[in-house]
Image: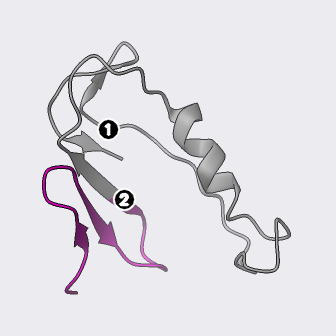
Amino acid sequence: MSGNTLGTLFTVTTFGESHGPAIGCIVDGCPPGMSLCEADIQADLDRRKPGQSRHTTQRREPDTVEILSGVFEGRTTGTPIGL
């Protein structure tokens, strides 16, 4: 799939497919020391839940974010962030 990376200095690359086991992204270019936790991102994912607005999806699947890399003890490390 083309076009799955956005940005130049700060990039976001997505991976996975809608009905696959998972979808995710890699965020690169984030400086070290920024506060970041799953709850910061989960609030935006929750906006996609059915019934939030007429523009949300009708599917009923759990969307739960998990930070896999790039964050240690609630602070970014300066390495790519895997979600």
Magenta-colored span: 1-24
Q: CA distance from mark 1 to mark 2?
A: 10 Å
Provide the residue designation for mark 1. Answer: 68
Question: What's the residue at 43%, 67% (across, down)?
Answer: 21
Instruction: Give coordinates of residue 67: x percent, y percent.
Output: 39, 37
Tell me the tag on residue 13. none
Q: Is residue 34 left or right of residue 36?
A: left
Task: Say whether disc 1 or disc 2 marks the residue closer to the N-terminus.
Answer: 2
Identify the residue at horizontal 28%, vertical 16% (top origin): 33
- Residue in the picture at 70% in, 58% down: 47
Dot 1: few (<14), some (14–19), or many (≥20) neighbours within 10 Å?
few
Secondary element at image label 1: loop
Q: Quadrant of residue 45?
A: bottom right
Residue plotted at (74% across, 71% down): 60
**Quadrant where the image shows the N terminus:** bottom left
Query: Does residue 78 appear left or right of residue 48 in this picture?
Result: left
Determine whether label 1 and label 2 are within 8 Å by CB: yes
User: Would you say residue 72 sits in the magenta stretch?
Assistant: no
- Circle 2 — which element? strand
